[in-house]
Amino acid sequence: MKKTPSVSSNVLANFAGKAWAGLFSLAFVPLYIKLMGVEVYGLLGIFISLSALLSLLDMGLSTTLSRELSRLSALENSEQESRNLVRTFEVVYWGIGILIGISMIVLAPLITKYWVNSSSVSSEIVEQALIIMGASIAFQWPGAIYSGGLMGLQRQVELNVIRSIMVTMQHGGAVLVLLYISPSIVSFFLWQSFVGLFTTIILAIWLWKLLPKSERATRFDKELLIQNWRFASGMIGISVVSILLTQLDKIILSKMLTLEMFGYYMLAFNVANALNNLVTPIFSALFPKFTQLVASEEESNLIMLYHKGCRLLSVLVLPVAITIAIFSKEVLALWLGNTTAVQNTHQMLTLFMIGTALNAVMTLPYALQLAHGWTKLTIYKNIVAVVLLVPLMVWMVHMYQGIGAAWVWIILNLGYFIFEAPIMHRRLLKGEMRKWYWRDVLLPVVIVTIIGLVARAILPVDSSKVITLLGVLSICAFSFLVSAWVAGYLNIKILKVNRP
């Protein structure tokens, strides 16, 4: 096997890839709305929700494959098992993809008739869009297993190069299709389907190229499924309740609201969700490393890397999240240039940013649990959350629509922060909980919040776009520098760990 890149290289590659993907995703939204309309953009929200709901069929295999390839890479004579594992999971994933495509073709008329509330888009167009959505999801589906394999091999540099090229095709090509072929949602999803299939094929070729060579033929091995079923079943439980918690609001709102109002809600959600472009690179780089350190019982290095990773995540995520939360109206006005969209979106964006920031700081504690193969805590906490928060979600959406759903998102993640973190640290990292709460999370929160609120009071309300843009960027940059200085980390070398 080729030499494994360092954690720092993987983190930088992940950030570059996510920054590129996030830039394209956000930059093209105003164009999509201009060319297709806000109501049609609401169909994109349905597409995102369907993708998330169908991810229940993932069965935890992509994360399982990533974890197992990370573990096997630290063991001798594991080449054949690694290749058989990928082939086994590959067969399962392609089967699921075919099932998704067939199911969407069958269900599209029913979803169009009984669920989607459209006033200006014809039912025929909605039905066609849903069928093509199904094809797009089916084509992209097996890509998850290949991405998980590349992450498990710690080949995030190659993975992000591929993803960056494909996201350029995905969005740049979509705009060309809308401008020069047809400005319709059907044309948009046809292009997405093509790019999705092409991306999956490229990822498959690259993963098999990087897998260690073996003299024996690669084969499907059901024993490997059985062997990994315990961890995978835990991931199934996590996926089911997590998807229910994160997608219930969209299911309810897509039924209760018009496509236009649902489009505004999804606009706020998608902007806040872009924050994960700062979170995922750290998780993707550190999760395989956590797994290796757990397997080799290097506890001191694990603790060191855990705290450094948590502080890095806080320093990178919190300045962006809190600055946008405080200046949500200004940020949306600069980005969209649409007064109606800004008025209907900015309050939801503020709430979503707060909830997503809380969710972000829980990412590495979750990664540490998975590295230990401990999935029960996440399953149990999410079951409790479903029992308590689903009725609250239904009531809040009924009373306050999108604003109510955004408040429930904050409550959910605040509960994780208050209750889950102590349980995890007492079992896996005894004596490290206070350090995580204060040094890794709360200190950056206090610093960035104070800077943001002071700036909010100073920055003129009716400033020009140039002054507003420079002001928001300066506040975010200053918050980052101060929190990084206080944390003692101003460069990527913090992710280096001592080697025995």
Image (cartoon, rainbow, N blue to C red):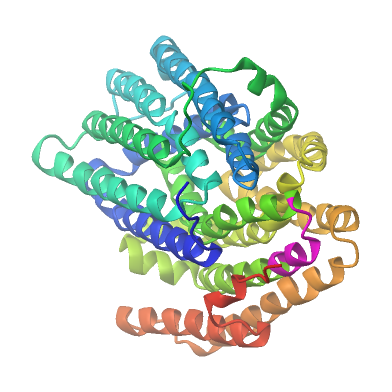
Along the viewing direction, whichever of 234 and 450 lies nearer the viewer: 234
Q: Is residue 172 left or right of residue 353?
A: left
Asked if residue 43 is positioned above or below residue 167 in the image, the reply reads above
Determine if residue 411 is in view. Answer: no
Residue sitting at x 46%, y 21%:
217
Residue 332, position as x, y percentages in the image? 40, 64
Q: Quadrant of the C terminus?
A: bottom right
Asked if residue 311 is positioned above or below residue 240 in the image, the reply reads below
Residue 445, position as x, y percentages in the image? 68, 75
**As drawn, which residue projects farthest toward the left?**
180
Q: How many marks?
A: 0
- Is 214 magenta? The answer is no
Residue sitting at x 33%, y 34%:
196
- Is 305 magenta? The answer is yes
Q: Is residue 464 left or right of residue 259?
A: left
Q: Is residue 71 left or right of residue 374?
A: left
Along the viewing direction, whichever of 352 and 399 lies nearer the viewer: 352
**As drawn, which residue projects farthest toward the top?**
106
Residue sitting at x 78%, y 36%:
379
Residue 232, position as x, y percentages in the image? 68, 30
Along the viewing direction, whichever of 270 and 488 lies nearer the viewer: 488
Determine if residue 468 is in view. Answer: yes
Along the viewing direction, whichever of 323 and 54 lies nearer the viewer: 54
Asked if residue 32 is positioned above or below residue 57 in the image, the reply reads below
Q: Find the magenta span and give its range.
A: 296-306
The secondary structure that dominates the magenta segment is helix
**As drawn, which residue projects farthest toward the front?**
215
Asked if residue 380 is positioned above or below residue 116 in the image, the reply reads below
Residue 24, position as x, y percentages in the image? 32, 55
